[in-house]
Image (tube, rainbow, N blue to C red):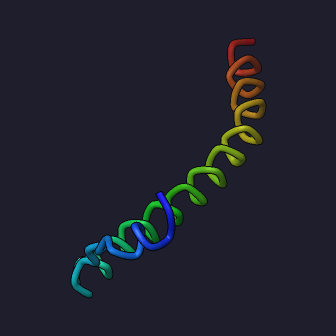
Amino acid sequence: MNYDNLANYLIPIPDIEVQKAISDIYTAYITRKRINEQLKGQVKNICPILIRGSLEGEK
């Protein structure tokens, strides 16, 4: 396929409302992914403390 053939194809572009909705979904996904990574880090730091506390409570 050469450029002349490719130039004859029309690529449909959704209307602006659909584009904004897609953008909003993507932004929410990225935000939630970042929050998830932060929470995983917090759990990783807190978990040893919780385990230690539960073991000390059994004594």
Q: Position of residue 24 (x, y in %)?
A: 37, 75
Q: Position of residue 58 (x, y in %)?
A: 69, 13
Q: Residue at x 22, y 84 (%)?
A: 15
**The C terminus sits in image quarter:** top right
Q: Residue at x 45, y 60 (%)?
A: 29
Farthest residue to the top: give it. Answer: 59
Q: Position of residue 37 (x, y in %)?
A: 64, 50
Between 10 and 44, the residue placed more toward the observer is 10
Which quadrant would residue 43 be assigned to in this image?
top right
- Against 44, residue 38 (above or below) is below
- Against 59, residue 42 (above or below) is below
Between 37 and 56, the residue placed more toward the observer is 37
Figure label count: 0
Query: Horizontally, is 36 left or right of 1 in the view?
Result: right
Q: Position of residue 31 (x, y in %)?
A: 52, 66
Q: Residue at x 76, y 34 (%)?
A: 49
Between 4 and 41, the residue placed more toward the observer is 4
Farthest residue to the bottom: give it. Answer: 16
Between 54 and 7, the residue placed more toward the observer is 7
Which quadrant would residue 35 be assigned to in this image?
bottom right
Q: Residue at x 32, y 82 (%)?
A: 20
- Against 2, residue 47 (above or below) is above
Query: Horizontally, is 55 left or right of 12 in the view?
Result: right
